[in-house]
Amino acid sequence: MRVWIVFLLCLAGHAMAAPVSDTVCVCVCVCVCVCVSFELAYASDLLTSDVPQEPEVGVNPVQVEIGEFDEAIEIVEEEEDVFAENPCLNHHCKKGKVCEVDESNTPMCVCQDASTCAAAEGDFEHVCGTDNKTFDTSCHFFATKCALEGTKKGHKLHLDYIGPCKHIETCLDSELSEFPLRMRDWLKNVLVTLYERDEDNNLLNEKQKLRVKKIFENEKRLQAGEHSLDLLAHDFEKNYNMYIFPVHWQFGQLDQHPVDGYLTHTEISPLRAPLIPMEHCTNRFFERCDADNDKYIALEEWANCFGIKEQDVDNDLIV
């Protein structure tokens, strides 16, 4: 079962005027929690894509294979009869759609009525669309987008970021250069934390564990914490090799729909949406990654964005 590590949205609403250190708590499945320190600054845009499948709101950039935790359930005759009577029980619809059966009892996906979505329990459930409109919940957003399917407005409407719509400051060139410093350090710390907490939870596969183990056991590793940008830049130059795998690993976690060696705006959105309200350079950073402006980010472009040298880009590191 593919499971995404989910932001507990302790991120939401933390707009900052200067770099600070936030503790980001994320949970895996129903039993494994990981808390990592992510140095973030400021507050910040998101996706446009041809890909029909919209990502789930609130998911963390870190996606991991954690194996099948659910025990196998034997389907008895009664349950089989239930599936036969209601084929929708075993029919999946994408976000914004629900299953209904036609006259011949064939399941089909239709747009969900937004009025049937549960009301938001707090601001942390609000999401902002690319039309700069705040939606009560992700359910309301995807139902609205579905209702507009086939229209020009619907084609342009995408999930922008998590939280109510607000003014996003312009990202200056000097600020843009700081963004990958914090992201690189955070990705490295996420991997180390997953390695420490892995046990038998399959947060990382065996090849990933071997690579992260080398980082974890390296005495020169910069420990997680609040660090100046100068120190982060110095550590990247001094311990460059520690950052190569985390950058490749993140690319592999995002490249899922489909796995083709390219990242679309939709695939990147799980990383962007939670970050935008906190890092106002997020959108500009990912736009710059698409160096040839073809709406796809290749591994080479991704690695270059994070300062990885061309000779160190290796598809075999996406394990």
Image (cartoon, rainbow, N blue to C red):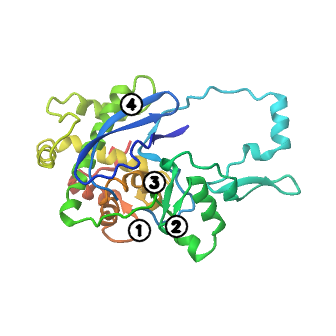
Q: CA distance from mark 4 to mark 2?
A: 34 Å
- Mark 4 vs mark 3: give the one in front: 3
> Could you say where residue 99 lies in the image, as x and y percent from the top left?
74, 52
**Residue at left 20%, top 66%?**
173
Helix, strand or loop at disc 4?
helix
Tell me what residue is drawn at x 84 percent, y 29 percent: 77
In the image, which is nearer the foreground, mark 4 or mark 2? 2
Quadrant of the frame with the C terminus: top left
Looking at marks 3 and 1 on the same chain, the residue that comes earlier in the sequence is marked by: 3
Residue type, label 4: Glu
Q: Are marks 4 and 2 in contact (CB under 8 Å)?
A: no
Amino acid type at circle 2 is Asp
**Viewer-side label of 3, 1:** 3
Q: Which residue is mark 3?
A: 163
Instruction: Say which of 187 and 123 sits in front.
Output: 123
* Alpha-carbon span between mark 4 and mark 3: 37 Å
Q: Which residue in the protein does label 4 denote?
A: 206
Disc 1 vs disc 2: Cβ atoms closer than 8 Å?
Answer: yes
Q: Which mark is residue 50?
A: 2
Mark 2 or mark 3, earlier in chain? 2
Front of the two marks 1 and 4: 1
Q: CA distance from mark 3 to mark 1?
A: 25 Å
Residue at image mark 1 = 295
